Image (spheres, rainbow, N blue to C red):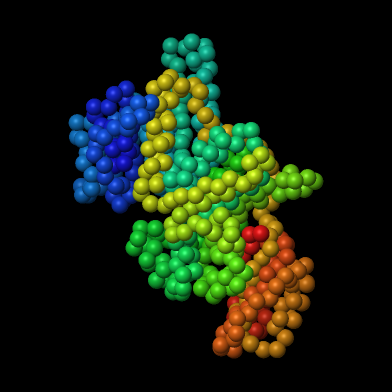
Amino acid sequence: EIIMGRLGGSNAYASSSMAMSSTDNQNSMPSFPLHSFSSNSSIRPCIITKICMRDTSKRRSFTIDQHATTVTTDVNSIIDDEDIDIVVEVMGGTDLAKTVVVESLKRGKSVVTANKALIAEYLDEIKDLVQDINQKSMESTTNGSSSSKKGVVFAYEAAVCGGIPIIQALQHCFTGDIIHEVMGICNGTTNYMLGKMEGGASDYAEILKEAQDLGYAEADPTADVEGHDVRAKIAILAKLAFGTTVPISSIPCMGITQISSVDFEYAKLLGCTIKLVGTAERLSQFGEHDGALSVYVAPKVVPQSHLLASARGSGNAVAVKSANLGITSYTGPGAGRFPTANSIVADICRVATAAGNNHSNSYHHPFPLTSDIEIDGDYSAPFYIRVSFQDELGIIRRVGEIAEKHGVSISTVLQNPIKDRRMADFVITTETCRESQVREMCEDIGYEDFAHCTPLYMPMLE
């Protein structure tokens, strides 16, 4: 509805034909009048000629101009339609969605998508396909071929951080700069849930249900709460920032399911909060930021003074550290129908305007940088470790011995007054060390008789 409302209907002038392939989630589409137009005359209005839906009989909250738009259940009727210039894929998943995206591009149709999982998993395949198509388009135009091929655009602003224009920023605004680090809160569901825990709500199941009722979390929340959603997004941001393709299977990933309200109590003592953060950082080897690329997803203990601590509710925030600009920040709504649709509409306008100005052979590359930086999945940081235990003599001493065994230096020890000697917690923070050192240390602590379970650990943002 936002797309139709912002871009115009059957009376649109100088239009590109466009088709949408979507799921049946009407909650993701707020309504606008079909024939409203932007006051910006440089934006090229579009006609939505076809919409592919799984269930055409389902009641919709918007009106379709039947003179301009056909509703169908056959996705091939969109892919095979030579009059369609742009395909918008918002169905999700990586099976049928991949077919729609790849086949549309092969047929000379530009694609706008919000599908981060698809992009992260098939990034190089999509990049190479777009590059090959546009190279052939340029060659045919240079040779004066009468059957010159159209160039295509692959646009995906809505795939990462909803309404925040972080993709455009990384594609175009750091051309004369060198990025050292990108990190961000890229999932509104988990940020909302962690905020509720920080506010005193302790029942994980109730918080999750509330997030689902508000539309922040899916019926199956695994991708959100286990960090898989952020993993796909940080893989995309890493490619844009550093030019290296990072397979999602190689990205260490920790979710929020083991975090409880007690962790926020200890974080508060440290002057911090807890956020689920995706990080892509160029490490230092011989000089500054000249080493391997470290990419990971984990809940982080974040100082209250840091930009990321200010992201509330379902908001997202991204911080980019670069040689020329230092730290630049991007914050805003990262989830929901309006922010996502806003980014999709912006992409459609960019694609349609470029096509209308005959820029078909000068489209920007969707991933401008190419590099082959070594990937180091064993990231370094100071760590927060919470040990749940049954009280007895010598626990702190024993934990210190295990830390020494693994080369981990303890920085501080925190413990609230013990109310139940059979179920208590204490926290240690460490100096900077490798994630593998802390993981193995926690595994050893988990085998001790006093330990209820393997300790929870999280990196700390300095």
The picture places residue 85, in percent across and down from the top left corner, at: 37, 28
The picture places residue 414, in percent across and down from the top left corner, at: 65, 76
Residue at 38 percent across and 38 percent down: it is: 345
Q: Is residue 62 above or below residue 389?
A: above
Residue at 53 percent across and 27 percent down: it is: 132
- Left/right placement of residue 70 relative to residue 186 reads left
Question: Of residues 129 and 34, which is closer to you in this image?
Answer: 34
Question: Of residues 197 and 96, which is closer to you in this image?
Answer: 197
Question: Of residues 27 and 328, which is closer to you in this image?
Answer: 328
- Left/right placement of residue 150 relative to residue 234 reads left
Question: Of residues 351 and 105, which is closer to you in this image?
Answer: 351
The picture places residue 31, in percent across and down from the top left corner, at: 26, 45
Residue at 42 percent across and 71 percent down: it is: 205
Q: Is residue 434 above or below residue 332?
A: below
Where on the picture, by quarter, is residue 44?
top left
Residue at 24 percent across and 27 percent down: it is: 11
Tell which residue pokes out farthest to the right in this image. Answer: 286
> Which quadrant does the C terminus fall into?
bottom right
Using the rendered image of the protein, determine whether residue 402 is visible from the camera's viewpoint.
yes
Where on the picture, by quarter, is residue 454?
bottom right
The picture places residue 348, in percent across and down from the top left corner, at: 39, 34
Q: Is residue 196 above or below residue 72?
A: below
Q: Is residue 184 above or below residue 301?
A: above
Q: How many marks?
A: 0
Using the rendered image of the protein, determine whether residue 253 is visible from the camera's viewpoint.
no
> Which quadrant does the N terminus fall into?
top left
